[in-house]
Amino acid sequence: MSRTLRGSWLSRVATSMVCLGAVVMGSGAVAGDARAVPAPDLAVETVTGGLRIPWEVVAAPDRTILTNERSGRFVAVAPDGRAHTVRADLSTLFVTGEAGLMGMALDPGFATNRRLYTCQSEVTAPTGRITAPPSLIRSPLPWPTIGQVNSVVAWRVAPDWSALTRERTVLSGIPLTMAGREAGCGVTAAPDGTLWIGTGDTGLPTVSQDRSSLGGKVLHINADGSPAAGNPDASPIFTLGHRNVQNIALGPAGRVYSIEQGTHVDDELNLLTAGGNYGFRPDKRFPLNDEDAVMTDPRVPGAIGPVWKSGAPTVAPPAITFLPDSGWGQWNGALVISALKGKRLILVQLSDDGRRVMRTADALDGEYGRLRGTTIAADGSLLLLTNNGTDDKILRVRPS
């Protein structure tokens, strides 16, 4: 099923207002000459449906597509379009709020080693099965950790995609509470074999600025879990002062970007610098989390502002992906941001130095509901997940 779609005039105006007002603090970038332009015409087809809250999608060298559901299921789609459940032992999975089976990435050597990484919530004690009351999960209460943790896990994928075998825990100790709030847990595998991990602050007000906690951070580690070269203080922590980092993208010239969900204002796209503090400090109402806190707080010395921010209202972006350098016309090499609450794709063309937004466009605005995971397939198309809770889909998006 294919449709040709164009971003709406109202959405383009709204994006323009956001970008023109996006002046930031500290040593961060500014929106600069950003302007909203019409979105490209896009052709969209359904790869498969029948999913429920899928989180991430990856494309393997053999053209198999793998996705996962937050509740604990892997689904593979063969090149001929047939989909099936991939067996995996997820008996320790903890699922509530935003927590569960989340980030996913293929090892750069997947064609030979068949290795897959996930970032997932796990139970570490019998009490870890206890969750906060669903009606109170979003409240700013200081929910405790009583046997829950987020971990990065390495899996081996069977040659026929029938099963995943857990190899080892790469990194654990990423904080998580019984409410599963602001769980983050995005994982990206770099060509050099290192892993980039985005974490959430768990909704607790001191976590993002706490250098002894892995929450509210971007982590950079080797495949064995040790800190990657270039990290400050020989720690897994690459940057701090984040609220809820759900995805990381590797851009041109070695640049690394994170996408971060805001409180009531300012989702952020950040260009990461080793040791950088991105300024989230929601401790005005300690011990409660301050949901009115600004994302880049001037009280934080040297706070780095974003390259792009949503303004108000937030759009809840869960994923970012760079488009290929060819095949997408004037959007070659642009960054694509998916939006859950915003229910659209946001195309962002960055400056040559990657520090300014030159132009933006909205696409698929409201056409498919909440949008989550993204990746680029071998043919240069964009694979995209819907996240509406029933009959969710993997979509393939191309310029028409």
Image (tube, rainbow, N blue to C red):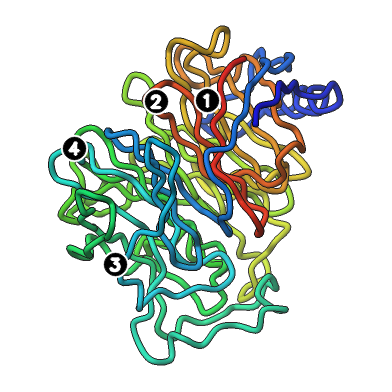
Q: On the rendered structure, is 330 left or right of 238?
A: right
Q: Residue 136: x and y, percent?
A: 70, 78
Residue on which the image places disc 4: 111
Label 2, label 1: how many angstroms apart (C-alpha)?
Answer: 9 Å
Residue on which the image places disc 2: 251
Picture disc at residue 335:
1
First in sequence: mark 2 vs mark 1? 2
Quarter placement of the C terminus: top right
**Which residue type carries mark 4?**
Ala
**Which residue type carries mark 2?**
Gly
First in sequence: mark 4 vs mark 2? 4
Q: On the rendered structure, is 133 left or right of 174?
A: right
Label 4, label 2: how many angstroms apart (C-alpha)?
Answer: 23 Å
First in sequence: mark 3 vs mark 1? 3
Can see residue 386?
yes
SS for dot 2: loop
**Which residue type carries mark 1?**
Leu
Farthest bottom residue?
126
